């Protein structure tokens, strides 16, 4: 049985007063326990970060960048180990876990360029013999609170940039899959990051609340469900912090009749069932514009029938189990609800065979196979709720306009995609749709590290998206210096407002 602790000031810390179980989702068995932080544990982590901050802030840009380069190499060298940890606690298949590590590494690579990213502006002679220049400086101690579905990638959206900018960081990972955070902490140490610059507190609401109210925490990045994102944003800002809080999603794929339906079916199945649908950028609704619905559903079902479901460490598995029993049951409840609401259950994931087991519904572990619901009524709960599992809903619509109206009527605005061969329609879509990340014939349009990631509406509280240049902006404060070096001719008092001369 493993026991997962905190990482404070370069060492493991924390007792066993309060713990939570860690499961192997493929078997349903308990594989270990994670310590849940008290407010005092959080205070200790923040104190370590406060103490480490001044020296790290003053380390040269080149030195900080060199530590990031070393961290990048170590993470790459340990990617298999990291992926195995993720797969064992989250359930996703190994190749998918490697994919999240790769996407996280892109942010580290971006942050290696911090000397360039932190260049300020300089204006010579803004007034007579007066120069003006701008700089961006780190906030101090910043925190990251992250969800279960990307235990490596989502923290890596945050800490490489925060640390590169000269901040000290406290990570509060999901208690469901906490082990990846400790491997990342050890690799930071090996890369030469001074102790105290990167800390991990394991925990739940107690840890989150203390981070939100702690006077020494200057900024909070959050990724998780919408109700908690809203709570984190409101509580953190009420305590004077800057907060970026990314929430849930319900991503629609709008398919126009002129689209290549084989490409659409491949994309819908990949984006709907990859990582068992537990991705904030998963496609969970296909809006099929008449008259292609029947043909498209047939192509989707053909592909779903071929999917291989099994444990994440079996190389034959394409899709693993869900993260917990409670979550699996919640997702599975939408199969009956969908039918009650008038949808047709075309593929029932409870019946899907599991590698090495029987049907999903009878196999130990948190299994549910890929499920397809057709003719889901627009506006029904199955259509609008974030189900966050392997359930793909097909909603039939009469026109492009009807599709865009449904997308824009939704609570969330994280990602969306249009599939068409009509460039004009795609251009209109990217302009009209109220969503932060758009795919054109691309089902999971996750921005690269040098752009910023974030949704609109209830998918993001705050005004700054994560990583890219917006990430650099979030983790720094601007300063503008106006300087005059006197020459001997200067003199005279002037009480007027300073204006250019
Ligand atoms: P969650 O909101 O339950 O948990 C996220 C974090 O908040 C965890 O660290 C958790 O410990 C903490 N937390 C949970 N309940 C809390 C409470 N009452 N008070 C304070 N803190 C609390 O989310 P999850 O189930 O881990 O992750 C899935 C959700 O995350 C989905 O809604 C998904 O769409 C979303 N997500 C969004 C993005 C994005 O970029 N927008 C990315 C990944 C995941």
Image: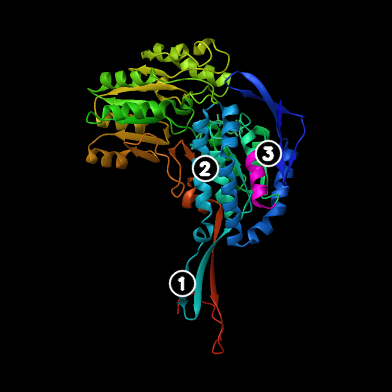
**How far is the residue under mark 1 from the one under mark 3?**
44 Å
Judged from this view, the residue extending furthest toward the bottom is 489
x%, y% of residue 458?
46, 35
Residue at 55% x, 26% y: name it: 313
Disc 2 designates what residue? 104
Disc 3 designates what residue? 201
- Which element is circle 2 on? helix
- Which element is circle 1 on? strand
Give the dominant element type of the magenta stretch: helix, strand or loop: helix
x%, y% of residue 279?
47, 31
x%, y% of residue 347?
39, 14
Of badges 1 and 2, nearer the viewer stands: 2
Residue at 57% x, 20% y: name it: 26
Quadrant holding the N terminus: top right
Q: Quadrant of ligand 1?
A: top right
Is residue 186 one of those drawn in magenta? yes
Left or right of 23: which side holds 95?
Answer: left
Residue 186, by quadrant, is top right
Q: Residues within 10 Å of mark 1 (few under 14, many from 20)?
A: few
Q: Residues within 10 Å of mark 2 (few under 14, many from 20)?
A: many
Of badges 1 and 3, nearer the viewer stands: 3
Let me know if residue 237 appears in the view.
Answer: no
Is residue 407 one of those drawn in magenta? no
- Which element is circle 3 on? loop
Let me know if residue 302 appears in the view.
Answer: yes
Residue 393, by quadrant, is top left
**First to last magenta residue range:** 183-194
Disc 1 designates what residue? 123
Above or below for 44 versus 286: below
């Amino acid at each position: 049985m493993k026991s997962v602790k905190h990482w404070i000031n370069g060492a493991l810390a924390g007792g066993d007063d309060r713990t939570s179980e860690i499961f192997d989702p493929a078997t349903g068995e308990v594989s270990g326990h994670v310590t849940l932080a008290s407010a005092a544990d959080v205070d200790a982590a923040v104190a370590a970060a406060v103490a480490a901050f001044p020296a790290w802030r003053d380390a040269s840009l080149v030195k900080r960048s060199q530590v990031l380069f070393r961290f990048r190499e170590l993470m790459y060298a340990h990617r298999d180990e990291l992926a195995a940890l993720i797969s064992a606690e989250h359930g996703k298949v190994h190749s998918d876990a490697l994919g999240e590590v790769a996407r996280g590494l892109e942010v580290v690579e971006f942050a290696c360029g911090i000397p360039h990213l932190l260049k300020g502006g300089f204006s010579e002679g803004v007034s007579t013999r007066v120069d003006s220049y701008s700089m961006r400086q780190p906030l101090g101690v910043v925190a990251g609170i992250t969800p279960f579905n990307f235990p490596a990638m989502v923290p890596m959206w945050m800490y490489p940039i925060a640390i590169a900018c000269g901040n000290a960081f406290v990570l509060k990972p999901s208690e469901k899959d906490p082990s990846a955070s400790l491997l990342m902490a050890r690799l930071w140490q090996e890369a030469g990051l001074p102790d105290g610059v990167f800390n991990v507190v394991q925990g739940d609401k107690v840890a989150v609340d203390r981070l939100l109210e702690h006077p020494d925490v200057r900024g909070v990045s959050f990724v998780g469900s919408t109700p908690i994102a809203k709570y984190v944003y409101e509580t953190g800002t009420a305590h004077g912090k800057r907060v970026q809080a990314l929430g849930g999603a319900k991503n629609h794929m709008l398919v126009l009749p002129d689209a290549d339906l084989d490409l659409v079916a491949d994309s819908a199945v990949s984006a709907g069932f990859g990582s068992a649908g537990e991705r904030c950028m998963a496609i969970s609704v296909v809006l099929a514009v008449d008259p292609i619905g029947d043909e498209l559903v047939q192509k989707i079902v053909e592909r779903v029938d071929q999917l291989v479901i099994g444990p994440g460490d079996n190389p034959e598995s394409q899709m693993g189990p869900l993260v917990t029993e409670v979550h699996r049951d919640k997702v599975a409840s939408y199969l009956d609800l969908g039918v009650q609401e008038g949808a047709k259950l075309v593929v029932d994931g409870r019946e899907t065979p599991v590698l090495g087991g029987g049907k999903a519904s009878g196999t130990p572990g948190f299994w549910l196979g890929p499920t397809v619901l057709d003719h889901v009524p627009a506006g029904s709960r199955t259509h609008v709720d974030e189900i966050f599992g392997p359930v793909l809903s097909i909603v039939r619509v009469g026109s492009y306009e009807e599709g865009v109206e449904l997308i824009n009527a939704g609570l969330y605005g994280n990602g969306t995609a249009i599939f068409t061969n009509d460039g004009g329609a795609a251009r209109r879509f990217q302009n009209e749709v109220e969503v932060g990340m758009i795919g054109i014939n691309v089902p999971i349009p996750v921005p690269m590290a040098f752009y910023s990631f974030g949704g609109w509406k209830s998918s993001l509280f705050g005004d700054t998206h994560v990583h890219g240049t917006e990430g650099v902006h979030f983790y720094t404060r601007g300063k503008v210096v106006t300087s005059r070096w006197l020459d001997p001719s200067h003199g005279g008092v002037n009480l007027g407002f300073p204006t250019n001369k």
